[in-house]
Image (cartoon, rainbow, N blue to C red):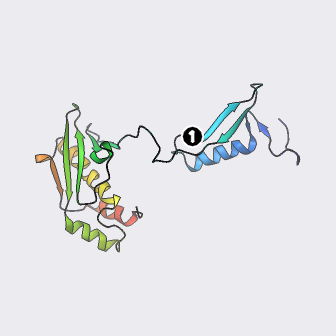
Amino acid sequence: MRRATPAEPSLTVGLLTYGRLYEFLINHLLHPYEFPSKLILTPSLAGEVMSSEIQSPIPDSVAANTRAIELVTENGFSILRLWEIDEGRPPIAGDYPFLVRNPQCVERPVAVEIIDPLIVQIELSTRGRIRQGNSFWICCAERHLAIYVWEHDDYPEGDKLRVNQLDPDDLITSIRWQIA
């Protein structure tokens, strides 16, 4: 290996320049779940040294073949958000449609309703930060549905689940929930 001199801006280490290697390692340590990788490696004409360049990620609006978020419970039920499957807008009212698939791959649409007094309670406790239509309610409805199918090992009666009470996890989550 060589030492960097003032005339030489970077030092070659293995197949990457020292500056790019450092940037590669730091970026992936700070953001380990950032996919796809923004680093592109290309071989030189001689084939012994590779160069790197950083590529900007594709914006969400341009991304192709997006899939709906799927939540899988411990007993094998899968919960998908119907509006993501249909590529529609998320619901803004207190009624959230999901597609639930049991371990035998039988799918049924299930609606989760969060009653209005709970929405008002959270709006007041968060000083208006979480209102009706906030993504917090999607997370809350999805979590209650997942708990139900996990505990009962079956679909809700009538394919509808009504959330009448928030549990402590919902309250703690609402306190930490960022503006969405």
Residue underneath mark 1: 37
Residue situated furthest left in the rendering: 158
In-image side of 104 versus 180 (left or right): left
Left or right: where does residue 176 sit relative to residue 162? Answer: right
Q: Is residue 102 above or below residue 7?
A: above
Q: Position of residue 6 (x, y in %)?
A: 88, 49
The percent coordinates of residue 54 (x first, y second) are 64, 43
Residue kind at label 1, given as amino acid type: Ser
Tell me the element at label 1.
loop
Residue 117 vs 23, above or below: the answer is: below
How far across and how far down the image is residue 43, in percent?
A: 71, 29
Local crowd at mark 1 within 10 Å, few (<14), some, or many (≥20)?
A: some
Image vertical order of residue 168 relative to residue 23, above or below? below
- Measuring 19% from the left and 43% from the top, which residue is drawn there? 109
Give the x, y percent position of residue 86. 30, 43
Q: Nearer the viewer, residue 104 or 84?
A: 84
Locate residue 34 relative to residue 124 in the image: left or right.
right
User: Which quadrant does the N terminus fall into?
Assistant: top right
Q: Report the label total.
A: 1
